[in-house]
Amino acid sequence: MGRVGKLTTAHGDVTTPTLMPVIAPSDILLSPRQMRREFGAELMMTNAYLTLRSFGEEAEKRKIHGILDYNGPIFTDSGGYQILRYGGVEVSPEEIVRYQDAIAPDIATILDIPTGVQTTRERAAETVQVTLERARQAVKLRSNPKVMWCGPVQGGLFSDLVAESAREVGKLDYQLHAIGSPVELLEGYRFAELVDLVMAAKQNLPPQRPAHLFGAGHPMMFALAVAMGCDLFDSAAYVLYARDGRYLTSEGTLKLEELSYLPCECPVCAGGSPEKLYDAPEDEQVKLLARHNLHVTFGELRRIRQAIVEGRLWQHVQLRCRAHPRLLDGFRRLMSYRDFIERFDPVTKTSAFFYSGEESAGRPEVLRHMRRLEERYEPPPLPILAIMPAFEGERPELPEPEKTHLVKLVPPFGVVPEELEEVYPLGQLQVPRELDPEQIRAVAESLSSFLKQHGERYEQVLLFNDKPRWGNSLVNACASVVKKLKII
């Protein structure tokens, strides 16, 4: 469900998916201007509650763009993260709505109540209801027509509550929505539960509205989140990790003190060494690491956008999710939602289908082919069916070609009638010669299903069996037509 979009704000357009670097209004390490110039950051995030505490009425006069000395798009959070971390804030939901209207960010957020993941169902239901009440109230309080508003979704690990929250806030006048309470899941590498949370929200939010995933800032998980339809991310990880001597990569996090080489091509790393970084004065080291972390982050987002344009996002997600077993758990959980995902997946793409592991058998293209073969396909009225596994060399001769309907077995798609073999992606795929168990299983199931549905119409069934590659799986799949089966 990944998409490249354009979000138009009062201070300019933003290309999504993108990260909003979080900037503490009273402790700016890298200026928004530098982040835009050096890293291509288009949308910044700061905290309206902390702005209120630090600047008060001054920010109402100078506006948030004056406080940050930045004339580009700015998104403000409302203090919900402080509620999650510290239990509360010293501001009312009405006050923070009016304050954001006054300081005039491009996008503002209501003061929601984060559910978190360590809570009872009763408390989770309460956070959903209170957040919805505040969302409804904020629609009436808003007064600045130039400010876009974000309506958060809560519910935590209770998918039915997340779905209810998404449905109800989606009915209100909001331009964006944020999926709340993922931070503890992200910190604990609980990616399978994160997938359930995000998908419960995405299946019930208006699809045309951008979706923001609160607190997600590590490049290793961006591809998975974008595949679920997340458009915006925010994080202060680039600086928090830098202060702890942690070095981000698109596959995980490394400790600076343990590096022998700098495995990156960014300007910080290309002319440096771990020793130079490690021996630098503390303030300089933090700034250099923060710059590296942002280069890696925005580089990964550019790769994701390019993968979307080329139609190979799923392949990119597979690559990234092999970097950590918990990410792989999340990716496999995502495949349980493939019926929903298939509705949004493009029917044709500009890139070939690459089989790069057993998860490829769960791609939307495979599901679509199998579903359409069952629901839309009618074989031609010929008396003989020839079943032929895909061969790399010259195709075997058919005994009576004018009377024979030929179907090929193409892993992982299964049965592919000869007259459809050039339809995308059946004729535009690359599959390893060595079959894995998932490919064999998928093809055998497809063949068995096809023969149960259409086998009676044929007088004879020919199976060109390639036993060294397929074992007995193809013969077993022909059980419904065994009386008319001839194995060649």
Image (spheres, grey):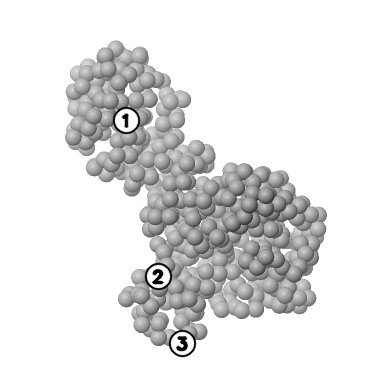
User: In the image, is residue 321 above or below residue 71?
Assistant: above
| Label at residue 254 | 2
Report the Cα–Cα distance between label 3 and label 1.
63 Å
Residue with the mark numbered 3: 281
Secondary structure beneath disc 3? loop
Q: Report whether 284 appears left or right of 66.
A: left
Residue topped by disc 1: 444
Task: Give coordinates of residue 150: x percent, y percent.
Answer: 68, 57
Seen from the viewer's position, the closer of residues 32 and 253 is 253
Query: Is label 2 in a helix, a strand or a loop?
Result: strand
Say the numbered circle drawn on residue 329.
none
The location of residue 229, given as percent across then percent down, is 54, 50
- Label whose residue precedes the other's in the sequence (2 or 1): 2
Q: Is residue 301 visible?
A: no
For image coordinates 59% across by 69% down, the residue present is: 22
Residue at the (45%, 25%) spot, across then down: 376
Type of residue at label 2? Leu
Give me the residue at 37% from left, 24% from top.
450
Give left or right: position of 48 versus 455: right
Q: Nearer the viewer, residue 299 or 79?
A: 79
Q: Identify which amino acid the numbered label 3 is placed on.
A: Pro
Secondary structure found at label 1:
helix
Crowding at mark 3 (Cα within 10 Å: few <14, some 14-19, many 20+): few
- Image location of residue 407, percent across then percent down: 31, 26
Residue type (three-letter) at the residue carrying disc 1? Ala
Q: Nearer the viewer, residue 107 or 468?
A: 468
| Nearer the camera: disc 3 or disc 2 | 2
Precedes in sequence: disc 3 or disc 2:
2
Q: Quadrant of the C terminus?
A: top left
Give the mark, 3 or 1, whose residue is nearer the N terminus: 3
